[in-house]
Image (tube, rainbow, N blue to C red):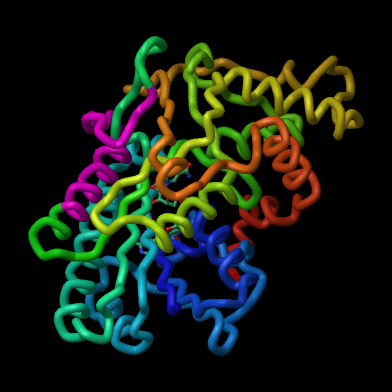
Amino acid sequence: MKILITGGAGFIGSALVRKLVQQDKHTVINIDKLTYAGNLDSLTFKNLEHKYHFHKVDICSRDEIREIFDHYRPDCIIHLAAESHVDKSIGGPENFIRTNILGTFTLLEVVRDFLNSRRKEKKDFKFLHVSTDEVYGDLTINEEPFNEEHKYAPSSPYSSSKASSDHLVRAWYRTYGLPILITNCSNNYGPFQFPEKLIPNTIISAIQGKSIPIYGNGEQIRDWLYVDDHVEALLNVLEEGTIGQTYNVGGGNEIKNIDVVNQICDLLDEFNPSNLDHRGSHKDLIDFVEDRPGHDKRYAINNSKIKRELSWTPKKNFKSGIHETVLWYLQHQNWWKRIFSGDYKSN
Ligand SMILES: NC(=O)c1ccc[n+]([C@@H]2O[C@H](COP(=O)([O-])OP(=O)(O)OC[C@H]3O[C@@H](n4cnc5c(N)ncnc54)[C@H](O)[C@@H]3O)[C@@H](O)[C@H]2O)c1
């Protein structure tokens, strides 16, 4: 297949691109605007004939996207490009509205035109829209995990822009018959995640001996999934999913933020003891800061549909996944140091 990926220089997109290029079965076309979150250091290969092509393109640029579709004639699109950081969306929501809503609208319209002109040739085309469990809002401790029928109740500008994009994608299926699939996934972690997010920020701050900020009392619960398990789920949905359907993806690892941070500190106490100086533990660096406005209390995913219908199951539990992730950030300091120095932008 010729697989067009948007946002393939980001955290999850780059894991997907690396996996597909390694598999050597498909041609991958990666389009990414390279915002601050896009990092070509995460993709060590350059353009490879018949295998991998990169284009620096904004998904809101309809003409450029159309040219790429006409040139490559892809068999499917996996749409990950987004502004993805909740804190940034609170400070400045405009880019979130533009990329997450207008960008998705632009892609839907380009695909609609493309399929109208190539209906016979592209009868098996698929549009896989990658979304988040944050569209459902949050849960109290006693509520059942989100299933695919849960009502939408997003809290932040980020999650509401993703919710809007999900609605557009469903509407293009209902109204125009676009062959779409949607996934709503819980919090991902793993190698190559931008330092702004909780897990890499904690690891990197602790390695540097800097304070580790935790919002509020740290009691918020997230359902963590190792990024490669998410990639597997996306490929399962692409290959086996039923057109028009939504699949919730989650790791079944509900953990409080404070416990995530404590586990990371324990691992660094073991792997990086020379960093401790006069401290007893990296936990001494923890700093409880004012809570994020509208902070969701608990996310939890009911992943029984994707398990039952597509035989997907997460391979990595949190204990082994976080162990590998902490080691990765310790062993790949150059990757994140180039982000802090800005050098990653020169790639
Ligand atoms: N990270 C998570 O825990 C998580 C969980 C569930 C769903 N998701 C969804 O998965 C997708 C990828 O998330 P991520 O964590 O890899 O994000 P990320 O921020 O690491 O990467 C986003 C990528 O999109 C690119 N991009 C942004 N605006 C663009 C535009 N206008 N045109 C083209 N490219 C643009 C960026 O350059 C970057 O490479 C997002 O849609 C996100 O909503 C993420």
Q: Is residue 204 visible?
A: no
Q: Nearest the camera: 189 or 202?
A: 189
Q: Quadrant of the C terminus?
A: bottom right
Q: From this view, report whether residue 343 is shown above or below residue 197.
A: below
Q: Quadrant of the N terminus?
A: bottom left
Q: Quadrant of residue 265?
A: top right
On the image, the x and y values in percent for residue 163 come to 25, 42
What residue do we see at 69% from left, 56% from top? 335
Compared with 35, 268 (above or below) is: above
Is residue 147 toward the left or the right of residue 17 in the image?
left
Please determine whether, in this image, residue 278 is positioned above or below residue 73. above
Residue at screen point 40% across, 18% down = 297
Q: Residue furthest left?
A: 175
Residue 148 highlighted magenta (yes or no) = yes
Check residue 135 for magenta coloring.
Answer: no
Image coords of residue 232 (percent x, y): 54, 54
Residue 193 relative to residue 37: left or right: right
**Identity of the residue drawn at 59% across and 72% down:** 21
Is residue 156 in sight in this rendering? yes
From the viewer's perspective, is 318 left or right of 68? right
Residue numbers of the magenta segment? 145-170
Residue 135: image quadrant is top left
The image shows residue 109 at horizontal and vertical percentages of: 17, 69
- Residue 147 placement (x, y as % from top left): 33, 32
Give the residue displayed 27% in from the left and 58% down from the top.
243
